[in-house]
Image (spheres, rainbow, N blue to C red):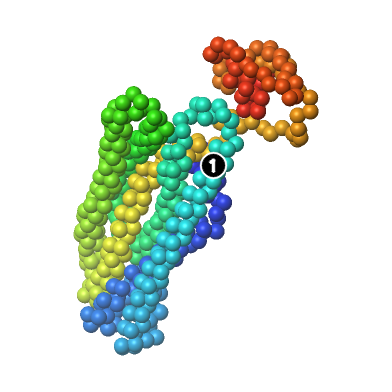
Amino acid sequence: MSPNRLLLSYALRHPTWIVLTVLLGFSSAMFNSVGTTIIVPLVLEFLGQKKLELSKAPPIIQKTMGLFEGFEGGDRLLIMVLVVLLAIVLKNVANYVNILVSTHLSKKLINTFRKEGIKLLLDVDLDFYAKTKIGDIINRISQEIGRGANAIKLAIQLFTTVITIFVFVFLLISISWQLTIATSILLLGVFVINQFFVKRSKEFGKVLSEKSRGYSGALLEILTGIRLIKSVSSEQDEYQRIEKFIDEREQAEFQSQANFAAINPINEVSGILAILAIVFVGKNLLLKDSSAEELEAISTVLGIYLFLLFRLLPVISQLNGQRSRFANVSASTAIVADFLRRDNKPIMSNGKNIYTKLSQEIRIENLSFAYPGHQDSVLNGVNLSIPKGTTMALVGASGAGKSTLADLLPRFYDPVEGR
């Protein structure tokens, strides 16, 4: 199972919160588009154009403005203002609730991942701890799980942002499909430029995860081995070692932040250039050979189109920023998915016999054992009997298998042969 699919299976344990996040994002997009569509005719009403001639306007604008045809004079203006204000208020309320819901979902995902991780750590065999550094485990539980949950949160935000963009694109196509094609071609360049930053963000995320793991491991080694460090007076050496990890981690964090900071200015400049280009295209496409009667209506349509486009550009910038942040935490997604997998870890199946008490003896018969992943046997054909109430000492050279035999008694490992 791929990392994304595995994490998705955990995310789907909270379907209500995911659906609620998507619905709130869609509602925000709808309220935003309604308010944006009405605001340009409203401004023209304020400027004294009491009766807009929109007979040649696109059907969606005619239907929207037709809602106010039953009102005259000041009532019409007042109703339009109230509708715009209501749309803005509802949009911001939806955004606020969406932030609360997505934050709550992120916290629930982090709790789910950490609880599953702790349960896994209690279920795995000792061989897992023999092959995995404790600092690496702590880093995964404390750092990588949070970043992995943030990846799911960003994926949901990406989905809702794409919905918002589709709503705006639908409105733009309804107004002028020719201008929308030109806009898409111009904004394609913005997408290509941002793809470069997305790739860099992914690389920086891998480096950041690697440096965080090294730092956590080094810090834990210092804390657990502080008596040995002081006994050999190696405080300065240990400080220099962990200082290197701290500097490298901060450098990776700074590079990630610098990469994020470059996205918004580039998107803003590219967006302004796109709007200027659309103004030029719209002038030649819509206003060319237009009569004086048509000029007012077409100017209004072009104004609505440009205003919608102007409101769309920040959403596109937001999408590019989310793509970059998602790429940055994608390395953590793979780390968390690998950590939560059970099929690649030694997990011993539970027995069926219920232990009551020792009745006669502890007996080992023809027992052979090799550590998981190793071919060489540590114990071969061992037979041993320890009667109840007696004490036995295992004596032998280092590496003879004394500790291994002691580990087999409480079933820390299963033997290869014998019982």
Q: From the viewer's perspective, is residue 231 above or below residue 22?
A: above
Q: From the viewer's perspective, is residue 43 above or below residue 240?
A: below
Farthest right residue? 359
* Left/right of residue 65 with respect to residue 107 in the rendered view: left
Q: Quadrant of the N terminus?
A: top right
Q: Secondary structure at mark 1?
A: helix
* Left/right of residue 202 with respect to residue 114 in the rendered view: left
Q: Measured from the top left, where is residue 413 in percent x and y?
A: 62, 25
Whether residue 257 appears in this view of the structure is yes
**Residue type marked 1:** Ile
Q: Residue at x 28, y 62 (%)?
A: 310
Q: From the viewer's perspective, is residue 17 above or below residue 383?
A: below
Q: Residue at x 71, y 14 (%)?
A: 383
* Left/right of residue 75 with respect to residue 343 in the rendered view: left
Q: Which residue is labeled 1 in the image?
A: 118
Q: Nearer the viewer, residue 157 or 378?
A: 378
Q: Nearer the viewer, residue 93 or 323?
A: 93
Q: From the viewer's perspective, is residue 26 above or below residue 230?
A: below
Q: Residue at x 54, y 29 (%)?
A: 128
Q: Measured from the top left, where is residue 100 in percent x and y?
A: 44, 62
Give the number of marks: 1
Q: Nearer the viewer, residue 161 or 273?
A: 161
Q: Measured from the top left, where is residue 84 in percent x and y?
A: 35, 75
Q: Measured from the top left, where is residue 362 in percent x and y?
A: 73, 23
Q: Residue at x 57, y 41 (%)?
A: 119
Whether residue 206 appears in this view of the structure is no
Q: Quadrant of the C terminus?
A: top right
- Quarter where residue 68 is shown: bottom left
- Quarter where residue 273 is shown: bottom left
